[in-house]
């Protein structure tokens, strides 16, 4: 898990005085809204390091054709208990096989990290009051999980030798 | 019952350690109330009127004597000596101070227990038929499937923060004893024409302020595919369920609003998972895994069919009554399952003291191979009792206050803790239940009234399942006072009660001092109006609500309309 601090983040949004610029100039490490990306994707050259930031009600399948050009997809947690972005992350990784960075922003709290990681989020920009040490500890409590996730696509029962049906025996 | 593996055991201990870390950060001021809330809820910790409430998961209602003794110890050492069984087959404690909560989680983990997902907007404890695995009318034992689903839903990373709570019930018998149509997902095990096992899947049932009956979304999902199908249902809900209004956030509202469009979206998602998702075929449950889990649910050693006997032969009246109400048919010849009634004068329905927990544990060791069940109507059940042991069990159950012969009768009511304990409640449930219990102590009268479901909830959250009661009592708050709305004709979906349906309100709410009178008037009306052999619900359906309205209006004092003459 990568911990992103806003100060050192190379990625920048393209805001003007009245909200997002409608048609930003092409450059590396621009983090675009979906509207901005739609406005520039036909004119920006291939090969730029480009990121988009998605509202959590967007169907990520609509991004399918764009993903090869995106190095970063940013998912949002407007409230930390609004779990829609977990499903977006899952589909990005598991169905669309997206291999770029998937970053969570917004109300990202320490105790969400194990879930985020298992859904395929590999970078977080936590809420300002969160403690990175506690977050790293939060990632280490469990020896494994029952169900599959995007990193371990086999559920426990399919993992031979690690407690699956073949490898797991009940104690008498 | 399911035998924990090393992995399972490490897992619940890890969960306890994770909770301790969260609690310590909270107590150190590093985890504010608002952020801690959702975390503690997903471990079963509420903050209630008096202290935190802990809800402990009893997966599909199956418990052993060792676990019950540990619960008794927790009641004694950390609570005030009692607990409360709920309609979701769980156990609640009411008085444990929050700083002790992590220690209690460790004690639970020591006996393979936990509070994982007993609250919060996640997939809750999966419930099932209280007589799963022993019922005479069972088609397919639901327990192995329930356990596979338990494992799948436990700390599912994608579905921990759904729009609202999510409840799954599973039944494998002809008779639905799990009220599956009232659940977010109801699963009925069945065989198709080829004899293969699968699930009939219902979705979108629920109580609360908008009672809705689940609809069939799929007539037959092969059991091997059930995890994929559930993933499709829950993901579609996670994406599209409403989050702007918590009263409209349950899946039932989405299903009702979208209808076939929701079903189509789920079925398309299921196909997409199968066709496109990395590792989706690994989620197909292999025979070997089902066999591994099912091996935990074989008959206990020593249970072998023996010739059945006429248990009623020579039975004295009191014993006969107990046999008729509390003793149930079994699929193994010579065996019965037996309900230990937790509905008796002097204790709130579903409550059990630490001494009774120890006593019930001892009874289960002596008569039921150490196994017990928690029923959704808040009683305990011993699943493996030999017919020849019934007289001895009756005597022992009587000694510990478990032998009230009232199962299925008026005083075997479902009641939530209500305003005495619950911070959500609008009104108290326990005093109303106590008053009704006191009035109906005559067994002849109870017998004469016959089978009836009385369900009492202290608020519209419906933990007391008032919607599905033949008589439902709902506590409401008006101007800071307690009022009670009465509904008639609800059904949980059992054969006795007919297709699941919410009851209908019989008039304006009653004042607190009128509630028991109103219930009594309803019963009196039934006894007056019934035809020979007619049960309460049949009379209500035949004659409609008018006679009941008239009778209950007749007892109004506080809420009586002033006469204008």
Image (cartoon, rainbow, N blue to C red):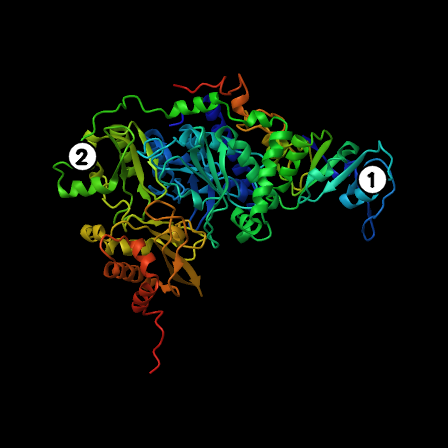
Q: Are there few (<14), some (14-19), or many (20+) residues within 10 Å of tag 2?
A: some
The image shows residue B226 at horizontal and vertical percentages of 51, 32
Q: Is residue B564 above or below residue B529?
A: below
SS of the residue under disc 2: loop
Gap in angstroms between the C-alphas marked 1 and 2? 81 Å
Residue A41 tag number: 1
The image shows residue B110 at horizontal and vertical percentages of 41, 28
Query: Is B443 displayed left or right of B91 in the figure?
Result: left
In terms of image quadrants, where is residue A28? top right
In terms of image quadrants, where is residue B82? top left
The reply to whether residue B159 is visible in this rendering is no
**Where does label 2 land, which residue?**
B311
Q: Residue at x 57, y 53 (%)?
A: B245
Q: Are there few (<14), some (14-19), or many (20+) residues within 10 Å of tag 1?
A: some
The image shows residue B177 at horizontal and vertical percentages of 36, 41
Quarter of the picture containing the N terminus of chain B is top left
The image shows residue B502 at horizontal and vertical percentages of 41, 53
Write down the chain letter for disc 2: B
Count of picture labels: 2
């Amino acid at each position: 898990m990568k911990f992103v601090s806003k100060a050192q983040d190379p990625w920048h949004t393209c805001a003007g005085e009245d909200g997002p610029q409608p048609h930003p100039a092409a450059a590396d490490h621009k983090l675009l809204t979906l509207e901005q990306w739609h406005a520039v994707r036909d004119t920006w050259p291939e090969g730029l390091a480009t990121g988009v930031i998605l509202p959590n009600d967007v169907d990520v399948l609509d991004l399918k054709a764009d993903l090869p050009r995106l190095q970063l997809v940013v998912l949002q947690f407007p409230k930390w208990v609004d779990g829609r972005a977990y499903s977006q992350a899952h589909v990005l990784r598991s169905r669309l096989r997206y291999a770029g960075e998937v970053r969570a922003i917004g109300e990202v709290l320490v105790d969400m990290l194990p879930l985020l990681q298992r859904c395929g989020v590999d970078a977080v920009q936590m809420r300002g009051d969160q403690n990175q040490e506690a977050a790293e500890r939060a990632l280490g409590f469990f020896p494994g999980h029952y169900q599959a996730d995007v990193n371990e696509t086999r559920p426990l029962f399919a993992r031979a030798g690690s407690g699956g049906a073949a490898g797991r025996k009940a104690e008498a | 019952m399911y035998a924990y593996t090393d992995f399972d055991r490490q897992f619940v201990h890890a969960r306890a350690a994770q909770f301790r870390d969260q609690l310590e950060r909270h107590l150190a001021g590093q985890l504010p109330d608002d952020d801690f809330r959702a975390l503690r809820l997903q471990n079963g910790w509420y903050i209630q009127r008096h202290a935190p409430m802990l809800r402990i998961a009893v997966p599909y209602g199956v418990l052993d004597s060792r676990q019950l003794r540990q619960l008794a110890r927790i009641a004694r050492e950390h609570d005030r000596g009692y607990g409360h069984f709920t309609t979701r087959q769980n156990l609640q404690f009411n008085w444990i101070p929050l700083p002790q909560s992590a220690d209690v989680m460790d004690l639970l983990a020591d006996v393979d227990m936990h509070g994982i997902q007993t609250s919060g907007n996640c997939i809750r404890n999966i419930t099932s038929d209280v007589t799963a695995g022993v019922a005479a009318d069972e088609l397919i034992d639901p327990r192995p499937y329930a356990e596979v689903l338990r494992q799948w839903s436990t700390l599912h990373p994608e579905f921990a923060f759904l729009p609202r709570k999510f409840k799954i019930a599973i039944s494998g018998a002809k008779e639905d004893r799990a009220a599956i149509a009232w659940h977010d997902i109801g699963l009925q095990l069945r065989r198709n024409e080829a004899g293969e096992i699968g699930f009939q899947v219902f979705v979108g049932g629920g109580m609360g302020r908008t009672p809705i009956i689940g609809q069939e979304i799929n007539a037959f999902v092969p059991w091997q595919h059930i995890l994929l199908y559930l993933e499709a249902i829950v993901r579609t809900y996670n994406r599209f369920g409403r989050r702007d209004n918590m009263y409209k956030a349950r899946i039932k509202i989405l299903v009702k609003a979208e209808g076939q469009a929701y079903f189509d979206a789920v079925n398309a998602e299921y196909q997409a998972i199968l066709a496109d998702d990395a590792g989706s075929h690994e989620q197909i449950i292999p025979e070997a895994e089902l066999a591994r889990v099912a091996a935990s649910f074989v008959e206990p050693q020593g249970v072998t069919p023996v010739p059945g006997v006429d248990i009623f032969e020579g039975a004295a009246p009191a014993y006969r009554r107990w046999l008729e109400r509390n003793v149930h048919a079994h699929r193994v010849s010579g065996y019965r399952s037996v309900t230990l009634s937790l509905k008796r004068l002097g204790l709130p329905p579903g409550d059990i003291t630490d001494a009774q927990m120890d006593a019930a544990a001892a009874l289960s060791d002596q008569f039921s191979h150490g196994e017990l069940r928690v029923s959704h109507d808040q009683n305990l059940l011993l699943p493996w009792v030999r017919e020849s042991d019934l007289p001895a069990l009756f005597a022992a159950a009587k000694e510990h206050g478990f032998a009230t012969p009232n199962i299925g009768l008026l005083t075997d009511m479902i009641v939530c803790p209500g305003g005495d304990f619950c911070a959500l409640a609008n009104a108290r449930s326990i005093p109303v239940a106590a008053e009704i219990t006191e009035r109906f102590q005559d067994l002849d009268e109870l017998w004469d009234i016959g089978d009836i479901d009385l369900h009492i909830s202290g608020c519209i959250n419906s933990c007391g399942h008032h919607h599905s009661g033949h008589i439902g009592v709902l506590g409401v708050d008006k101007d800071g006072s307690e009022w009670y709305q009465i509904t008639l004709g609800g059904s949980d979906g059992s054969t006795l009660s007919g297709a699941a349906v919410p009851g209908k309100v019989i008039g304006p709410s009653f004042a607190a001092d009128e509630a028991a009178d109103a219930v009594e008037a309803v019963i009196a009306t039934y006894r007056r109006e019934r035809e020979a052999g007619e049960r309460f619900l049949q009379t209500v359906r035949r004659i409609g609500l008018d006679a009941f309205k008239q009778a209950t209006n007749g007892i109004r004092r506080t809420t009586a309309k002033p006469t204008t003459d």
